[in-house]
Structure formats: C-alpha cells, structure tokens
Image: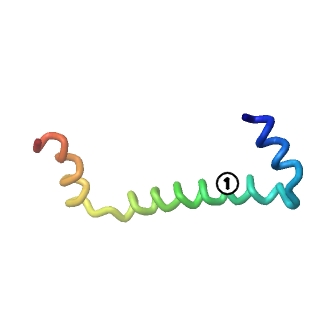
Amino acid sequence: MYSFIKKYTETMQDQNIYPLFSLLVFVAFFVGVLWYVKVLDNKQVDKIKNLPLEQ
C-alpha cells in the first residue's frame, strides 16, 4: 500500500505542498479547539462536566 502511494506522489508536481497544507490544517484545528476551551463559559463547563453523572 505504501509503495502505491509513494509511486503516485512521485509523479505529482508540487508534491511538497500537501504536507504543508496538512500541517496547517492540523495546527489550525488545535488552535481553534484551544481558543474554544479558553472562551468557554464556566456554566457550560459545569453542565458538560456533570453529563456522565446525570444518567
């Protein structure tokens, strides 16, 4: 399977853009999650924290 992907990517032009794009998506996702956690209201945190115990 890896050899197929390697052969496919060797024939593509500008193949160095795909790892950079995936890194940017990865970093943007986790920065977004950290921002969401930072601005989350304490009431929402308490509600989410007690969800497993309410059932």
Direction left: furthest residue: 54
Residue type pointed to by label 1: Leu
Residue 27 placement (x, y as % from top left)? 60, 56
Residue for badge 1: 23
SS state under label 1: helix
Q: Residue at x 11, y 44 (%)?
A: 54
Q: Nearer the viewer, residue 36 or 22?
A: 22
User: Relative to residue 41, is residue 3 depicted above or below?
Assistant: above
Q: Position of residue 17 (x, y in %)?
A: 79, 59
Considering depth in this image, is 9 or 49 the residue closer to the camera?
9
State how the image is colored. Answer: rainbow
How many residues crowd around disc 1 within 10 Å: few (fewer than 14), some, or many (20 or more)? few
Image-based side of 30 in relation to 39, left or right:
right
Q: Position of residue 39 (x, y in %)?
A: 37, 65
Q: Residue at x 46, y 57 (%)?
A: 34
29 horizontally vs 11: left or right: left
- Residue 6 falls in image quadrant: top right
Q: Quadrant of the N terminus?
A: top right
